[in-house]
């Protein structure tokens, strides 16, 4: 599969005004202005996004440390998050230059964002990125506007959540018409939610976490069938890399005759052995933003968790979905007429890197999840739920979380590649 993946400076001004009244000099207090934040911090990104998107939503925990930023103008995508307030690391990759330029491309606008809603498949006879009677070439590839540049309606908002909605209509590569109602709800999780969801006890940490509930409803008059094509919910998370980020995917153990290959790396050509390795229980993938590559896990191999460890910043990230059923079918996004259009992956990770001409959009890396292919009847709906967690703390405590959720120690992660 091929995939196109091609300042704003906050100026701190302090003015002291002096004026004279009746020949007496009167001192005026300095003007109160916003604190200036360094690029890479959450405060910088919050100020940047609220400047460029007037409807930006910020959800904060009670202690103001855990916080996320959501953009209705960009399909209700979570743009970034922090576990230490404005001064904390901004986890989501944001394309500041593109957003500031206000330029719009009719093919794809990679604005970034820590978690965004998409639909699959990208390629194949049932693609929604290629119009009917077109070849699978880059010049014919276009990201549908409703998951690229169009806004979602804010249906409801409170202190901890926001709900977005959009009705869409499109035709796939085979000419099948789809009418969808999309609902996307983002919920900021509190400390109790995190501990209960992951069954964490006797471990101290700082965290930010949120849940996205992504619902697609068939509002057309026809059944969605395999013969005419199915869609899937596709959620992609663009994250800031460091030289020491490793993606970690626990896998179901078993021989290839029963479960198939451990990991699929045939998206942009084979990933170098120095960047990808798999044991009987775990896949390790280097995610430093320096070499373009992508991996995927089938429903027979994937578990409910995939994560990453940033050894440079001591951040452990966990993405959680509902454990896939081995018999579930997932759309295939290969750019070709496919023999097996429902043999796709449920979990993916992408590492950005320079293109052949040396240009690069990022750097960033992605964690991705997909719903099964949706064979929905009229008025039937399906919800794909994903939870994202970022943890910081002592190495010992993060090690305990990693062992519990990813089945490997931090030392194993660091030594893998």
Image: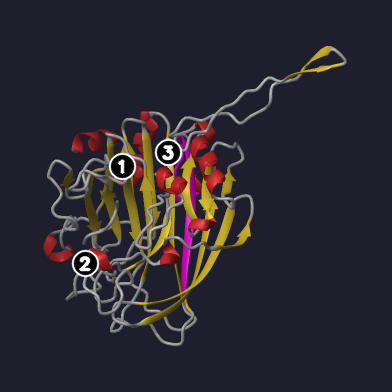
Mark 3 crowdedness (10 Å alpha carbons): few <14, some 14-19, many ≥20 = many
Looking at the image, do the residues carrying marks 2 and 1 touch, with CB atoms under 8 Å apart?
Answer: no
Q: Badge 2 is on which residue?
A: 137
Is disc 2 placed on a helix, strand or loop? loop
* Image height of 147 relative to 77, above or below: below
Binning the other alpha carbons within 10 Å of mark 2 as few (below 14), some (14 to 19) or many (20 upward) gives few
The N terminus - image quarter: bottom left
Q: Which residue is mark 3?
A: 391
Find residue 228 and name its label: none
Tell whether 140 sits left or right of 264.
right
- Look at the picture and state if 147 lies above or below 158: below
**Number of marks present in the image shown:** 3
Which numbered mark, 2 or 1, is in the foreground of this view?
2
Q: Nearer the viewer, mark 3 or mark 2?
A: 2
Q: Quadrant of the C terminus?
A: top left
Which of the two residues, 209 or 52, is positioned nearer the viewer here? 52
Residues rendered magenta in the picture: 196-217
- Residue 263: image x %, image y %? 19, 55
| Residue 328: image location, x then y, percent | 30, 70
**Mark 1 — residue?**
363
The residue most toward the bottom is 221
Q: Residue at x 53, y 60 (%)?
A: 185
Q: Nearer the viewer, residue 220 or 226?
A: 220
Residue at 27% across, 58% down: 302
Q: Position of residue 224 (x, y in %)?
A: 37, 82
**Residue drawn at (36%, 37%), measured in percent from left and top?**
400
- How many residues crowd around disc 1 within 10 Å: few (fewer than 14), some, or many (20 or more)? many
């Amino acid at each position: 599969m091929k995939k196109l993946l091609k300042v704003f400076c906050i100026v701190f001004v302090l003015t002291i005004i002096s004026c004279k009244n009746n020949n007496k000099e009167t001192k005026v207090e300095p003007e109160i202005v916003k604190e200036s934040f360094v690029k890479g911090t959450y405060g910088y990104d919050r100020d940047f996004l609220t400047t460029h998107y007037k409807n930006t939503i910020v959800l904060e925990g009670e202690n103001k440390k855990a916080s996320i930023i959501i953009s209705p103008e960009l399909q209700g995508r979570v743009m970034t998050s922090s576990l230490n307030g404005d001064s904390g690391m901004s986890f989501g990759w944001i394309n500041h230059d593109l957003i500031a330029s206000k330029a719009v491309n009719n093919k794809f606008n990679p604005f970034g964002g820590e978690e965004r809603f998409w639909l699959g498949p990208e390629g194949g006879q049932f693609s929604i990125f290629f119009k009917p009677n077109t070849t699978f070439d880059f010049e014919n590839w276009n990201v549908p506007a409703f998951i690229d540049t169009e806004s979602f309606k804010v249906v409801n908002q409170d202190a901890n959540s926001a709900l977005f909605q959009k009705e869409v209509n499109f035709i796939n590569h085979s000419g099948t018409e789809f009418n969808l109602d999309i609902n996307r709800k983002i919920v900021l999780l509190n400390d109790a939610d995190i501990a209960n969801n992951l069954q964490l006890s006797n471990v101290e940490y700082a965290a930010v976490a949120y849940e996205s509930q992504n619902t697609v409803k068939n509002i057309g008059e026809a059944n969605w069938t395999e013969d005419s094509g199915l869609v899937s919910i596709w959620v992609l998370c663009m994250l800031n890399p460091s030289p020491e980020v490793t993606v970690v995917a626990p896998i179901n153990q078993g021989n290839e005759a029963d479960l198939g290959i451990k990991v699929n790396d045939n998206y942009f050509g084979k990933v170098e052995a120095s960047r990808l390795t798999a044991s009987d229980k775990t896949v390790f993938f280097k995610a430093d933003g320096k070499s373009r590559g992508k991996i995927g896990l089938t429903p027979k191999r994937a578990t409910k968790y995939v994560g990453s460890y940033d050894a440079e910043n001591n951040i452990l990230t966990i993405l959680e979905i509902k454990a896939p059923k081995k018999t579930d079918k997932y759309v295939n996004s290969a750019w070709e007429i496919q023999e097996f259009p429902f043999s796709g992956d449920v979990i993916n990770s992408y590492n950005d890197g320079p293109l052949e001409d040396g240009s690069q959009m990022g750097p960033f890396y992605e964690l991705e999840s997909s719903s099964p292919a949706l064979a929905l009847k009229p008025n039937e709906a399906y919800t794909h739920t994903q939870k994202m967690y970022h943890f910081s703390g002592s190495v010992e405590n993060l090690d305990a979380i990693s062992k519990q959720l990813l089945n490997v120690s931090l030392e194993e992660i660091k030594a893998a590649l």
